[in-house]
Structure formats: C-alpha cells, structure tokens
Image (tube, rainbow, N blue to C red):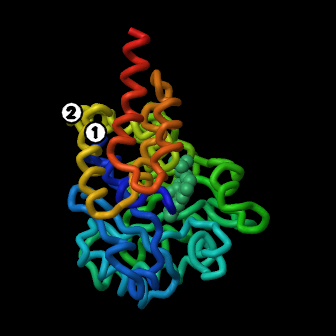
C-alpha cells in the first residue's frame, strides 16, 4: 500500500506474524529499471515471504522489472490492475487495465517468461460502466491462459470517473458473492479475496469460499490483529504484541544508527495499541515527539511507558 507498506512497516508486521505474505507498495516498472533500486525495492531478509507489486502496462519493461525483483530475492511478482489514482490512469495502468485483458495477459506472459517465481495479478471487479461479472471473468480467463494461476480480487469496481482514490476504496459496493462464484467456476485457480475484511472472524468465514484473504487497512490500522494469524490459520504459535515491540525496538535502534528518522518507523505503530489503556497517550507522545530533529529511541520508550503506566493505574 502506497506510503504505508514500506520496509519498516513490513518488518513490524512480520514480527507480529511469521506466515502471512507481505506485499510492497506498488512500484512502477520504469522506477525499478531507472530509479534508486535499493531505496525503492530493497528489503530485509526477515520479510520473507514477500511479494513485489509492480505497476505498468508495457510487457518489456514489466519483464525487466520482474527479473530485477527476482534477483533481489522477492518470492512473488504481483501486477497491479486495481489502482484508480489519476496519476496511474494517466500512465494507462492500474485499474484502467480492467478494460484491456489481452494486454494484461501479454504483460503477465512476458514476466512469466523471464522469472521462475510466481507472477500474480491484483485486480478489481471492473471499472466504470463495465459489467463486473463479465469484466472480472474476462480478465481472469485471459491471464490464466497466459499461465497465471493466482488472483487477488479487491471485490468492488473502481469508478474512474468522479471518485477519488480514497473514495474508490469504500464507495463502490463490495460483491463477495461474485468472487466466490468465480472461485467455484475455477477450482484450479487460487483466488484471494480482498476488500473490507476487518476481523479474523470475517477472514475465516471468507476462507470457506476462497483460497486466501488479503487484509489492507485493518492490518495497517490495527496491526495487533496480525498477532493471532499464525495460531489461527497456520497451526503455529501465537505472537504477542509485547514480544514484537521488543524486537522492533532493536530494529529501530539499529536503523537509527544508519540515519533512518525515528518517525519513518514509529508511524507504523500508531494503531498498535488501539483500545488498550494508554493508547491515546502513546500515540500523542509519538506524534508530538518522533518527528523532532534527532529524535531517538528514548522517544519510543517514553511513548511505550504511557501504556504500562496506565495499566498500573488500572490494576
Ligand atoms: C493508503 C493506501 C494505499 C494503497 N496502495 C495500494 C497499492 O500500492 N497497491 C494495491 O494493490 N493496492 C493499494 N491499496 C488498496 C489496498 O491494497 C486494498 O485493495 C484496499 O484498501 C481494500 O482492502 P482493505 O479493505 O482490506 O483495505 C492501498 C490502500 C490504501 C488505504
């Protein structure tokens, strides 16, 4: 997620959960080819399994970028066919590619030809006037013919005319039934459902109908939800937020020595203690202090102390 699932966020999420697959922010193929690669797509080995999401609509640059992603060590390359922002539309990629299933299939085919890791597609149900059942089925059929077997479907259309990117994540109605139907029609494909999943109970209910679920805003805004994922879905031991925070403190300390500003890491923690005593003071302490020049680990420790102090008072 742009501006959200950067490498620091992904480390925090990984410390809360070993098994869920993490996705980078969308990076355009041209940026991967021409930009500062370490800054754009560098990641920590602890993040595995981790997928690189690419944006683009031209087979050759996408193939080149996918190859670079594979060489960096990513576990999956994912093509974005869901982003509705104006900037992306002017580049003619993202959600507007729902209108060009053959071109998407060509892109996917070109990427698959040069990498041996999975190439997957994240899409919408359709855009604007498209009939969702038809648009989604066409896109999936074209890409499946090009060899892709995994689709992450954000279960709503994108309305490119008239809605902002943010509105496009909540205004067009969700249609989970259509995604379930597409899974039933394509038992050999891996269909992952995304959009509006707020709790692990909801995730579990969807998993009776589809192969996987993807959580966006819920995972970012309330990351503690991830601490139960390993135990609940992967038969492994649960994590605790406390242990994750201890480990993240070590990560933050080491990144500070490399010149990473404190706020770049602590901003991903703001929702970590939601609904717990002291959470508001924790957030406020970070918001007021973590952006100050030279802010160091003491600021984070002081913010955390608001939590224990409140708990002692409550006890
Ligand atoms: C701040 C923000 C940035 C996003 N950036 C991306 C992106 O780079 N690539 C992408 O496929 N989806 C992106 N999304 C969409 C989410 O991946 C997801 O499809 C959408 O929020 C619906 O799922 P949710 O209800 O679980 O959040 C973004 C969402 C948000 C809130």
The answer to whether residue 228 is seen in the rendering is yes
* Mark 1–mark 2 distance (CA, rounded to whole Å): 13 Å
Give the residue displayed 31% in from the left and 60% down from the top: 50
State whether residue 242 is above or below residue 85.
above
The vertical placement of 121 against 294, above or below, is: below
Q: Percent x, y for residue 7? A: 35, 60
Give the crowd class for mark 2: few <14, some 14-19, many >=20 residues within 10 Å. Answer: some
Question: Camera-side residue: 173 or 170?
Answer: 170
Residue with the mark numbered 1: 244
Q: Which quadrant of the figure has residue 149?
A: bottom left
Dot 1 or dot 2, earlier in sequence? 2
Residue 189 seen = no
In this rendering, the label closer to the viewer, 1 or 2: 1
From the top left corner, tell me how far across and down residue 125 is, in percent: 60, 60
Element type at mark 2: loop
Q: Residue furthest front?
A: 294
State the mark number for residue 237: 2
Residue 296's mark? none
Q: Nearer the viewer, residue 289 or 185?
A: 289
Hey, which quadrant is residue 303 in on the image? top left
């Amino acid at each position: 997620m742009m501006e959200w699932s950067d490498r620091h966020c992904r480390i925090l999420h990984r410390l809360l959960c070993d098994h869920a697959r993490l996705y980078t922010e969308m990076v355009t193929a041209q940026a991967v080819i021409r930009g500062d690669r370490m800054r754009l797509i560098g990641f920590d080995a602890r993040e595995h399994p981790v997928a690189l999401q690419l944006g683009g609509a031209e087979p050759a640059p996408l193939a080149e970028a996918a190859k670079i992603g594979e060489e960096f060590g990513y576990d999956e390359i994912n093509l974005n066919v869901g982003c509705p922002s104006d900037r992306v539309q002017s580049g003619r990629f993202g959600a507007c590619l729902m209108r060009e299933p053959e071109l998407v299939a060509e892109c996917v085919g070109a990427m698959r030809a040069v990498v041996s890791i999975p190439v997957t597609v994240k899409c919408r149900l359709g855009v604007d006037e498209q009939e969702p059942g038809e648009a989604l089925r066409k896109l999936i059929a074209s890409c499946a013919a090009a060899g892709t077997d995994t689709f992450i479907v954000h279960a709503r259309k994108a309305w490119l005319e008239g809605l902002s990117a943010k509105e496009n994540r909540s205004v067009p109605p969700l249609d989970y039934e259509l995604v379930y139907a597409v899974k039933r029609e394509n038992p050999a494909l891996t269909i992952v459902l995304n959009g509006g999943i707020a709790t692990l109970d909801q995730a579990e209910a969807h998993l009776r109908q589809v192969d996987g679920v993807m959580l966006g805003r819920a995972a970012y805004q309330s990351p503690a939800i991830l601490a139960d994922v390993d135990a609940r879905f992967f038969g492994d031991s649960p994590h605790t937020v406390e242990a994750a925070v201890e480990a993240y403190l070590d990560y933050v300390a080491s990144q500070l020595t490399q010149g990473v500003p404190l706020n770049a890491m602590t901003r991903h923690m703001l929702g970590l203690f939601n609904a717990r005593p002291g959470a508001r003071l924790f957030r406020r302490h970070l918001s007021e202090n973590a952006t100050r020049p030279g802010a160091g680990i003491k600021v984070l420790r002081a913010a955390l102390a608001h939590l224990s102090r409140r708990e002692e008072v409550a006890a």
